Amino acid sequence: MISTAASLNPQLETHFSDKKRRTLEGIKPSVLADIYQEDVNIATWKRSLSDTLRLSASEFVAANPTFKTVMTVSPQSAYASVLEALGSPEQTELAENITELVDMYCCLFDLKRAGLRLTALDKAMCPKFHVDAVPCRLVTTYQGVATQWLPHQAVNRSKLGVGSRGIADNVSGLYKNESDIQQLDCGDVALLKGESWLGNQHAGLVHRSPALDSHNYRLLLTLDFSD
């Protein structure tokens, strides 16, 4: 569950851009299986949260603005572990929803366990665009604004990490136009293919946490491969 900002040699930029990557989205969860296609580096299930789940997540974050839990769970242990971490027997719908995603994630990648992180945020956790040194990460936002990302062909990867020389992404040359920035919706479930996916080196999805206005909060869930 470690994120890194990749620093790449500018001389290799042309080579990297030769890798073509595309995005897929759909209204059924089966679209997530398309992450196995070599040229797909983000697959998104465009789901809608129930009104009760939205309210539940909002009330939870309001009452627990500094909440954070990190654990390793199996599909069998997830519900009890998450419900205990939430600290409220009233959060059964949220715990059930997270458990469903753990089950789907482990089934899709033939995993016995997943690394789970559930965090309430009042500021951007990773404000600069970066790639993750993981095979494939699931992300979903239960409350607030969701993850931003850049299409592969829109990125100058030599400007990632130290290649940006400390300059803000919007002026470093990482991308050309503000319209290049894409954003998930609250409730969307996305699989972000990382640098450690076999054959995906230098093609991991470039993404970042969105900026948050004062007194606005996010509730973010991520799932990762676990040893």
Image (spheres, rainbow, N blue to C red):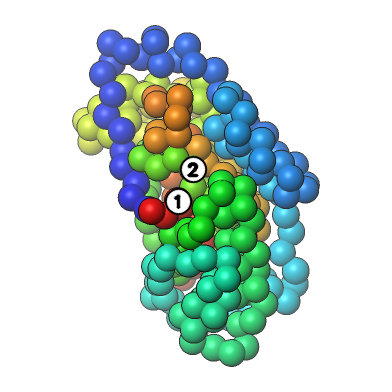
The image shows residue 117 at horizontal and vertical percentages of: 44, 63
Q: Classify 10 Å Cα crowding around label 1: few (below 14), some (14-19), many (20 and above).
A: many
| In the depicted structure, whether residue 8 falls above or below residue 17 | below
In the image, 82 versus 221, the foreground residue is 82
Q: Are marks 2 and 1 in contact (CB under 8 Å)?
A: yes
Residue 84 is left or right of residue 168, and the answer is: right
| In the depicted structure, whether residue 210 falls above or below residue 9 | below
Residue 54 is left or right of residue 145, and the answer is: right
| In the depicted structure, whether residue 211 falls above or below residue 68 | above
Residue drawn 49% across the image and 84% down it: 84
Q: Classify 10 Å Cα crowding around label 2: few (below 14), some (14-19), many (20 and above).
A: many
- Which mark's residue is nearer the viewer, 2 or 1? 1
Residue 225 got which mark?
1
The image shows residue 150 at horizontal and vertical percentages of: 51, 33
Q: Which element type, helix, strand or loop, lies under badge 1?
A: strand
Residue drawn 71% across the image and 64% down it: 49
The image shows residue 103 at horizontal and vertical percentages of: 62, 61
Q: Earlier in the sequence, mark 2 or mark 1?
A: 2
Q: Identify residue for label 2.
A: 136
In the image, 16 versus 34, the foreground residue is 34
The image shows residue 85 at horizontal and vertical percentages of: 46, 80
Residue drawn 55% across the image and 32% down it: 41
Residue 119 got which mark?
none
Amino acid carrying mark 2 in the image: Cys
Cα–Cα span, label 2 and label 1: 7 Å
Amino acid carrying mark 1 in the image: Phe
Residue 162 is left or right of residue 29, and the answer is: left
